[in-house]
Image: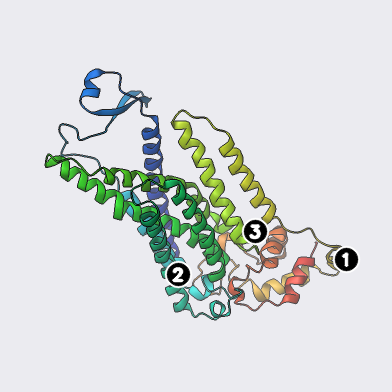
Amino acid sequence: MQAYLLDFANFMLRWLHVIAAIAWIGESIYFVMLDNSLRTPKAAEDREKGVFGEMWAVHGGGFYHNQKYATAPAKLPEDLHWSFWKSYTTWLSGFALFVMLYMTSPGFYLVNANSDWAWVANLSGWQANVLALLFLLGGWVVYNELCKRISPNMERDGLLSLAVAVMMVVVAYLSTQLFTGRAAFLLTGAVMATAMSANVFFWIIPGQRRMVKAMKAGETPNPLDGKRGKQRSVHNTYFTLPVVLLMVSNHYSFAYSHEYAWVIMSLFIFGGALIRQFFVLMHAGKIQPAYPVAGTALLAVAFWVAAPAPSGSDTAQASAEVTLAEVQSIIENRCVACHSSEPSQPGFSAPPAGVAYDSREQIAQQHAKIQEVVASGYMPLSNMTDMTDEERAAIAAWSE
């Protein structure tokens, strides 16, 4: 019953996380589109009131007229709309999911027993948990310091973008060394998501509050608050597509269990950012297909890097000697504790991803997937059932 309760809580928390993320990202993308679609107001009275730009739109059977003020409007309404709870709810629910799924079983999901760094492979569960928390915190601190030191007045944003790109490559590499493959992809995405939400919490909303306070007091707002908020919002919009991809990557072991998983991850991040750039520019009236072409090219390179190597002649020759019955024996000893309709492994109320190996038919149906995850070393998780290299080779040679 305890495992079922945890599964149900995970189910509901994941639902909340997805809903909050859709609302936050959707609103963020909308406001970027709105900001880039503004045109000089045609009415003289609007320009005299300080209206910087406007956009007319039709949606849902109605017409909308959006206006943006370059300076303080004559009067601010009491029911001014603020956008922050969607961001906070997304991050808090995502962190709660990480605690529930990963930090409650760190030896299972976080400890990278195959790391090239011996001290990482020998971490205990609680040490891996602390390392994961420091990884998230460190990612935000480094990113924030880059923003403050390289472009404090938003005058060198191009150089800052390059520095953040280098930082993400470093984060991708470190994550694959410090944590298991699936956790590495998730934590790299979480570093970006933490920066996004922290941008809202520490910079965008406080700056907007200072601007509103100054307006109500009849003072001129500090222009740096607006510029800084715009800078961090722009960063958030380029993080969006890579974060979403990394968060849904946990079902695709060909990427996170690869020897060059950090390269694949970096290609995904830059490919997503380039594709997002196309839409940002499109809203400003600039159609530049080179960006989605370049982004798609990076994804194609990732596909090429992640592709499994073709079987050699020796493997093909040995495959005739490995039968389904032999593979079933290995799987019963090494995999069925979790992958069963009634798992015996504590913490599981149902087979992971709904994949059970209770019969030869079920094993045969998952032939290609079993070979992929076993050959990569991803399964069994942390090799908790001590699958041998000989058993992995036998599964790789199985051709029935």
Residue 220 horizontal side relative to residue 359, left or right: left
Q: Earlier in the sequence, mark 2 or mark 3?
A: 2
Disc nearer the start of the sequence (1/2):
2
Q: Is residue 59 above or below residue 147?
A: above
Q: Earlier in the sequence, mark 3 or mark 1?
A: 3
Residue 13 can be seen in this image: no
CB within 8 Å, label 1 to label 2: no
Quadrant where the C terminus is found in the figure: bottom right
Label placed on residue 132: 2
Say which amino acid is labelled 3: Phe
What percent of the width, then of the height, locates residue 313? 87, 63
- For disc 1, the neighbor class at 10 Å (few under 14, some 14 to 19, many from 20) is few
Q: Quadrant of the N terminus?
A: bottom left
Q: Quadrant of residue 212?
A: top left
Looking at the image, residue 95 sits to the left or right of residue 377; the answer is: left
Mark 3 lies on a secondary structure that is helix
Residue at coordinates 57% horizontally, 38% vertically from top-left? Answer: 292
Instruction: Name the residue that disc number 1 marks.
Output: 317
Q: Nearer the viewer, residue 257 or 357?
A: 257
Where is residue 189 shown, x and y percent of the image?
48, 57
Number of marks in the rendered image: 3
Q: Which residue is mark 3?
A: 254
Quadrant housing residue 134: bottom left
- Check disc 2 and give the amino acid type: Ala
Question: How far, Cα to Cα, is label 3 from label 1?
Answer: 25 Å
